[in-house]
Image: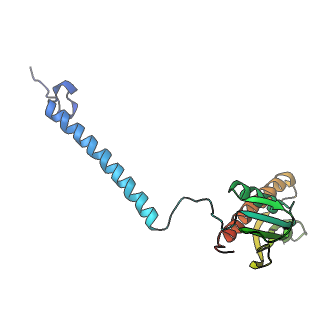
Amino acid sequence: MHQHSIPPSRQPLAAHSDSSLAAIGRRGALRRVAGASALMALVGALGGCGFALRQPPEFSFDTVYVTNNVASTVSKALQRELASAGIQVITGAPTGPQARAVVLGVLRDQRERTVVGQTTSGQVRELELRYRFTFNLATPAGKRLIEAREILLQRDISFSETDVYAKAAEEELMFSDMQSDLVQQVLRRLAAIHSL
């Protein structure tokens, strides 16, 4: 009777010697070590190219007085972010000079919506959404740290008169996204002030 031999890779586990099992275990361990080493090398490379997880901003002041449009949308969002970073936020002008304090003037917080595309019959097809935010920064004694600066963000959005509600919701989401972007841009500018 002819017997078929079983290839070594298909032999039962018991057929392997203790030394071959140890070799398999060592190869698995080596693969895990190599994988971990590759991961560490990737993390190191990302760090070397300037990639880093976003860190909370650090500020040279510990109190901010917010003046002018204190209840506007971006102003309120800025106040929340500053407070969560440990900054004391006070609405209104300071009564006198104070150490490690700044005055944030919110000069404009404005949404705009403009038609930029129409059909030949005059139906609106495309809108441009704009968000303007203008602010300045000074010490309570009046020293200007940031002159009046406007940040303008723009987004295009298609429009359909047959789907007004969905487009209105999409428009609100885009304004919300621009608001978040504005807040982060202002925070970065405030964090860039290193001396008062």
Decide which of 85, 181 is in the foreground and name it: 85
User: Which quadrant of the structure image shows residue 177?
Assistant: bottom right
Where residue 28 sits: x, y (%)? 27, 41
Kindly give the residue lying farthest to the left in the view shown. 1
Residue at x 15%, y 30% (from the top left corner): 18
Q: Is residue 159 visible?
A: no
User: Which quadrant of the structure image shows residue 81?
Assistant: bottom right
Decide which of 176, 165 is in the foreground and name it: 176
Residue at x 75%, y 58% (from the top left corner): 88
Q: Is residue 152 visible?
A: yes
Residue at x 80%, y 78% (from the top left corner): 142
Residue at x 63%, y 63% (from the top left corner): 57
Q: On screen, 97 above or below 56?
A: below
Kindly give the residue lying farthest to the right in the view shown. 122
User: Which quadrant of the structure image shows residue 71?
Assistant: bottom right
Where residue 26 sits: x, y (%)? 22, 40
Decide which of 58, 183 is in the foreground and name it: 58
Decide which of 123, 111 is in the foreground and name it: 111
Asked if residue 61 lies left or right of residue 25, the reply is: right
Asked if residue 6 lies left or right of residue 44, the reply is: left
Where residue 101 sits: x, y (%)? 74, 67
Where residue 83 sits: x, y (%)? 73, 56
Asked if residue 167 lies left or right of residue 58, the reply is: right
